[in-house]
Image (spheres, rainbow, N blue to C red):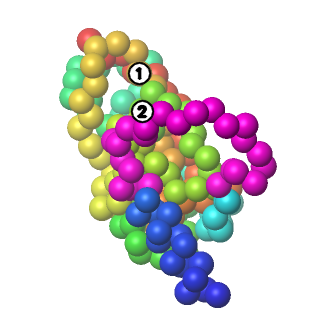
Amino acid sequence: MATKLLSVLFAATLFSLASCGKQQAETPAVEATANDAPAAMPRTTSPDGASVYFITPADGATVASPVNVEFGIEGMDVVAAGVNEAHSGHHHLLVDTGLPDLGLPIPADAKHIHFGDASTATELSLEPGTHTLQLLLGDHLHIPHDPPVTSQQITVVVE
């Protein structure tokens, strides 16, 4: 049973990563039913009080591109994707989007940037204008924890 579950989780993660940046062909509208919804996946428990936050930039900051972004974490450890250790995960940076479906692997695209190498900082190229940023910690399979470990959404203005 565990092997089958891991195979399903692995396949879903690969599908999520493989479909990154691909446009879907238009299909005729079909009425969705409850049976059409993707099945939620098992979620790793996060400890009480765990949090992620932005060290830089500050909420409301006016910045130049590329934007230096540094992530902080409390109550958990940052490890590479695929490393299954208790109270650990890796960062995902959400750019100009809300939280994804918390029961599925976090998408991998321009709005959901993965840091599966366990990095805690990046330089982010953004067009001039107002942008929102939010952090979401994912487990070894890129699935948000339960409860999810997210930062406050911040806003930056790129000159």
* Separation of marks 1 and 2 at Cα, in angstroms: 7 Å
Q: Residue at x 57, y 39 (%)?
A: 99
Relative image position of residue 151 (x, y in whole percent): 54, 41
Quarter of the image that includes the N terminus: bottom right
| Labels 1 & 2 near each other (Cβ < 8 A) | yes
Left or right of residue 113: residue 48 = right
| Residue 155 seen in render | yes
Provide the residue designation for mark 1: 131
Residue 145 in picture, x, y percent from top left: 60, 59
Depth check: give the residue in front, 109 or 118. Answer: 109
How busy is the neighbourhood of tag 2: few (under 14 within 10 Å), some, or many (20 plus)?
many
Q: Residue at x 36, y 56 (%)?
A: 18
The answer to if 32 sits in the magenta stretch is yes
**Which residue is located at x 40 percent, y 15 percent?**
130
Front residue of 71/141: it is: 141
Type of the residue with mark 2: Val
Above or below for 56 versus 86: above
Is 126 displayed left or right of 89 in the figure? Answer: left
The crowd level at tag 1 (other Cα within 10 Å; few <14, some 14-19, many 20+) is some
- Residue 31 lies in magenta, yes or no? yes
Segment colored magenta? 16-38
Mark 1 residue type: His
Indicate the quadrant containing the C terminus: top left, top right, bottom left or bottom right.
Answer: top left
Tell me where residue 118 sits by quadrant: bottom left
Q: Which mark is residue 95?
A: 2
Q: Residue at x 44, y 55 (%)?
A: 16
Q: Is residue 93 visible?
A: no
